[in-house]
Each structure stands twice: as C-alpha cells, then as structure tokens.
Image: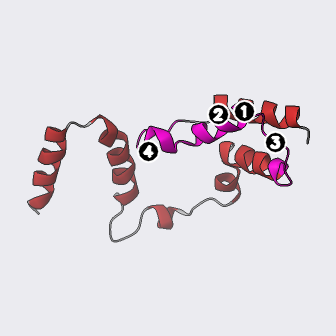
Amino acid sequence: MSRQTITKHYTRLLTYWPGDRLRPQERHFQNLLRQRVQNGAPPHVNADREVNAAYLLLDNTFTKQYPLSDTTMKPASNPTHYTDLARELDEAPDRTWMGNFMKRMKNMVRFR
C-alpha cells in the first residue's frame, strides 16, 4: 500500500477506535494511531497486515467467528463472575478514593 492509503486507513481507524477509560492516556491505542498519521505512516512491509488486523479487531470478527459457550461465560462455581467483572470495570474509572476505600471495606466482610 502507498503511504497515502495507509495514512487514510489509520485516520479512519482513529475515528472509530473506542477509548479505554482504565488505561493511562499515554498508553492508548489512539496515541499510536495518531503518531502514525502525524508521521505520515511510512509504508513498511507489515503496514497492510497491521491495518487489516486493526479492522478485524474493530469489527469483532474473532468474537463472531469463535463465540464463547454459555458454560464458559457462566461457570458453575460463580455464574455471575463475568457480569460482575464488567460492571466493576465500568464503575472503576468514576469512583473516588472514598468509594474505593468503601468498596474495599465491603469486600473484607461478607455475610453469607
């Protein structure tokens, strides 16, 4: 691919790539894409493979091609583990230090 085509693909990926609220800002994938766009994305041997891989990840191709079974997502030992984990990851970036402290205290004492 030419430099201009690769840069266009990186720009398109940059606009559609979702942000990661848990990762520090300097470690975002968008920063890598921005650097590639600003530097003119030099055409190297694996540039087309990188672009194709990023599009496959963006479209969730592998999740569609290899779906996880219900027994994998809801193990018998703790069926709500992955839903609890997803909820925790959604709540974590907005929680204050007091919220973190209270959450830790709640997890120390469990009534069952």
Q: Nearer the viewer, residue 65 or 94?
A: 94
Q: Which residue is mark 4?
A: 23
Give the distance between the C-alpha atoms of the residues marked 1 and 2, in whole angstroms: 5 Å
Q: Amino acid at mark 3?
A: Pro
Q: Which residue is mark 2?
A: 34
In screen coordinates, is 56 left or right of 91? right
Give the distance between the C-alpha atoms of the residues marked 4 and 3, in whole angstroms: 27 Å
Q: Amino acid at mark 2?
A: Arg
Contact (CB < 8 A) between labels 1 and 3?
A: no
Mark 1 Cα within 10 Å, few/some/many (few <14, many 20+)? many
Contact (CB < 8 A) between labels 1 and 2?
A: yes
Mark 3 Cα within 10 Å, few/some/many (few <14, many 20+)? some
Q: Is any part of residue 67 visible from this angle?
A: yes
Closer to the chain start, of discs 4 and 3, is 4
Closer to the chain start, of discs 1 and 3, is 1
Q: Secondary structure at mark 2?
A: helix
Q: Which residue is mark 3?
A: 42
